[in-house]
């Protein structure tokens, strides 16, 4: 599971700027784009935190269901949660899924939070420990985990537009801390949420390049929440790597034109493609 950086660079060199841009949004709701010239197949993604739905919304296609994330965290049993991560990975393999969109590392900040059943705790330390354990368990079996929803995406009220205002210390010690733990555990993807922090939508936020990729050294893929990319240039110039779903996202051909016009630096796009190729190599989707 893995390809050398020299090989990644060689493969990147086989792609035109347009072809590079077109790799960076989805082919379908749950699949990335393939590139036969590189031996790159589609990556298949699936929700969710308590099971593996697969690509179909079909009650006849069942999945093993875990207890809620809150119940798992209440055990404080990292070894147990790691083993359950292995169970989710087995379900993912059974359904042909490469990337599991879990764990959810948001916090119980209000009793009215509509997705608390997906979240581990109000405590960032416990959330970080249990989330990291799930990441280790899933990824020990060759399925990539996704830490979501980065960051401060803790409200369902106005979930697509809410602008979170939070001081630096609270942001780091409460909201960012569980994601830092997931990165330390080797998580392969981080999902940027719908919300804004201090006026900037997360898919265009410098929090993707500052703490995440800069300070913590995250070398995986930053994927958008589904439909969270609303513009082309500012998101492409930020730390976002993959716009989902496809094929009609604001990236695609619009991103290719922005590169050709010099509005989006080619070097930034190359970094995104390298990250995607590393992920594909890790899950066994490259060189087939």
Image: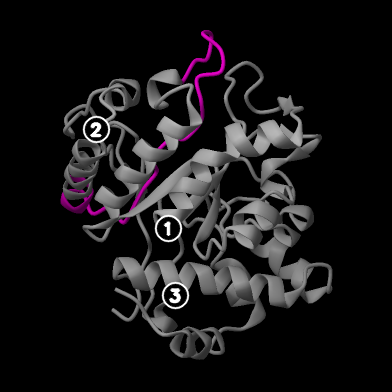
Pick whichever of labels 1 and 3 is earlier in the sequence: 3
How many C-alpha atoms fall within 10 Å of the one at disc 2: few (<14), some, or many (≥20)?
few
Measured along the vertical axis of the image, is residue 133 above or below residue 114? below
For residue 188, what is the image quadrant? bottom left
How many C-alpha atoms fall within 10 Å of the one at disc 3: few (<14), some, or many (≥20)?
some
Q: Tell me how far mark 3 sits from mark 2, CA to CA.
A: 42 Å
Q: Which residue is mark 1?
A: 188
For residue 280, what is the image quadrant? bottom left
Q: Tell me how far mark 1 sits from mark 2, CA to CA.
A: 23 Å
Query: Is label 1 in a helix, a strand or a loop?
Result: loop
User: Is 176 situated left or right of 190 in this image?
Assistant: right
**Residue 43: which disc?**
none
Residue 195: % across, % down: 67, 32
Query: Is label 3 in a helix, a strand or a loop?
Result: loop
**Nearer mark to the viewer, of 3 and 2:** 2
**Nearer mark to the viewer, of 1 and 3:** 1
Residue 28: % across, % down: 45, 51
**Nearer mark to the viewer, of 1 and 2:** 2
- Quarter holding the C terminus is bottom left
Question: Visible in this render: residue 245?
Answer: no
96 drawn magenta: yes
User: Is 61 situated left or right of 203 in this image?
Assistant: left
Residue 154: % across, % down: 57, 25
Which contiguous range is marked in magenta? 91-115
- Quarter holding the N terminus is bottom left
Q: Which residue is mark 2?
A: 77
Q: Which residue is mark 3?
A: 35
For residue 21, what is the image quadrant? bottom right
User: Is 217 situated left or right of 209 in this image?
Assistant: left
* Magenta region, main secondary structure: loop
């Amino acid at each position: 599971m893995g390809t050398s950086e020299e090989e990644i660079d060689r493969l990147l060199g086989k792609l035109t700027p347009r072809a590079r841009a077109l790799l960076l949004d989805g082919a379908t709701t749950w699949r990335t784009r393939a590139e036969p010239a590189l031996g790159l197949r589609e990556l298949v993604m699936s929700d969710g935190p308590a099971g593996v739905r697969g690509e179909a919304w079909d009650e006849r296609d069942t999945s093993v269901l875990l207890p809620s994330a809150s119940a798992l965290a209440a055990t404080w049993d990292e070894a147990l949660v790691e083993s359950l991560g292995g169970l989710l990975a087995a379900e993912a393999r059974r359904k042909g899924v490469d990337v599991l969109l879990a764990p959810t590392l948001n916090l119980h900040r209000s009793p009215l939070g509509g997705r608390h059943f997906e979240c581990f705790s109000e405590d960032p330390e416990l959330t970080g420990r249990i989330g990291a354990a799930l990441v280790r368990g899933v990824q020990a079996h060759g399925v990539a985990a996704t830490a979501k929803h980065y960051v401060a995406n803790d409200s369902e009220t106005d979930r697509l537009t809410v602008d979170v205002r939070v001081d630096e210390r609270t942001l780091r010690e409460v909201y960012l801390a569980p994601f830092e733990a997931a990165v330390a555990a080797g998580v392969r993807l981080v999902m940027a949420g719908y919300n804004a922090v201090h006026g900037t939508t997360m898919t265009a936020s410098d929090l993707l390049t500052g703490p995440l990729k800069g300070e913590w050294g995250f070398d995986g893929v930053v994927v958008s929440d589904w439909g969270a990319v609303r513009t082309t240039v500012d998101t492409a110039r930020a730390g976002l790597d993959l716009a989902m779903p496809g094929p009609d996202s604001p990236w695609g051909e619009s991103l290719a034109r922005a590169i050709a016009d010099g509005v989006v630096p080619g070097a930034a796009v190359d970094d995104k493609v390298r990250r995607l190729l590393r992920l594909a190599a890790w899950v066994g989707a490259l060189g087939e």
